[in-house]
Amino acid sequence: MGIYSDYINQKLSFDQITSERKKQLKRISILRKRDILVYASDSNKGNAPVSILPSDLLPFKDQLSYLKTNEVDIVLETPGGIAETVEDMVELIRSTHDRLGIIIPGMAKSAGTIFSMAGDEILMGNASSLGPIDAQVVSNGKRFSADAFLDGLEKIKNEVTTTGKLNPAYIPILQSISPGEIQHFENAQNFSKTLVKNWLSNYKFKYWETHSSSGKIVTKDEKEARADEIAVKFCKHSDWLTHGRSIRIKDLKEMRLEITDYSSNVELNDAIDRYYTLLRMTFDLTGIYKIFETCCSQIYQSISQAAIPTIPIPKNVKPQVAHADFVCPKCATKYKIQLNLDKNVKLEAASVPYPKNDNFICPNCGTETNLTPLRLQLEAQTGLKVVI
């Protein structure tokens, strides 16, 4: 049985998922012999601020304070975000820790890829991916790749040089773009390249001392040249075609970027896979969209679930029951589902009981709906376990 199927079949409560997730994170920390910090966001919750944002600096710094070892790891899961914020995050961790490992169990795209380049070691598995770092800019309400735009502009210039005239079809395009915007596109692209080049040459290549082929000493200029080559490749929109393209271990090796394949270490691979599965379950079954955590602490950011009303909890008083408004996805019949937070609670009028196996069968049309996310969200909100 697979890891995900095993955990799902156990019907774990939110607290149990959290406890097991922490257990696996601690296991990774022990195997790696260093403290560990997680920065993870759920790209599936597009209605929430899942990107790397300036507001992340405070919780990131807070959790960073729990790390005591000189060598540390960061588990990174992100669709990307603001490169300037990544620069601030890297400065925070690099100012207090000498060596940094970046563990990518799932994806670290765009600005997440830039973040990864600040590690002395990058650890990936067979399902892990980075992504292109071509800066994404917005102009006239449209988002597009700065590199693709600049390439297109260069083609127009070359065509004019060759033919001696401007194709009238290009006039509306050029009229909508100001020289200032062009400079902005160039600056955004150069900023991404500069971060990657500097971090690779200063951190990733710091311990690259001799050429494996000749045994000759590696010079600073050679480190910078290799870093620049990789940075340019990451930024080249025409090579990757889409900003969301997955760049995997084999692609990175072709770029001559050394990656530690953690899947070759059976125990570490199992610990990381289990942690990542539980991380995804935490996201998928609750309204949590961003997690900052260490082995002994955590900060959650979550969106409210419309199905569960806010439950006022008086100080020192344990609520006995909660109700959730549920609408059958097939026949649209409305139900008031009662979730008991204590034993021997009577079913209130006009309510239906929460199903013992988490699967609610609509009395009107027979449609079956799994309510596990609803239960786990309530348990996360109240800190109490639903009595089934």
Image (cartoon, helix red, strand yellow):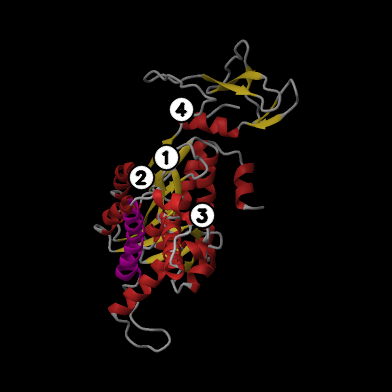
**Crowd class of label 2 (few under 14; some 14 to 19; many from 20; radius 10 Å):** some
The answer to which of marks 2 and 4 sits earlier in the sequence is 2
Residue 157 lies within the magenta run: no
- Residue 108 shows in the view: no
- Mark 2 and mark 4: span between their CA atoms? 28 Å
Q: Nearer the viewer, mark 2 or mark 3?
A: 3
Residue type at mark 4: give it: Thr
Identify residue for label 3: 244
* Residue at disc 2, secondary structure: loop
What residue occupies the far front of the structure in this picture? 165
Between residues 162 and 330, which one lies in front from this camera angle?
Answer: 162
Q: Tag 4's secondary structure?
A: helix
Structural crowding at the residue carrying mark 1, measured as other residues with C-alpha within 10 Å and reported as few (<14), some (14–19) or many (≥20):
some
| Disc on the earlier residue, 2 or 3 | 2
Does residue 5 appear left or right of residue 252 in this picture? Answer: right
Q: Secondary structure at mark 1?
A: loop
- The amino acid pointed to by label 2 is Leu
**Above or below 227: residue 282:** above
**Can you give x and y, in whole percent of width and height, for residue 125 in the image?**
52, 62
In the image, the segment drawn in magenta is 181-204
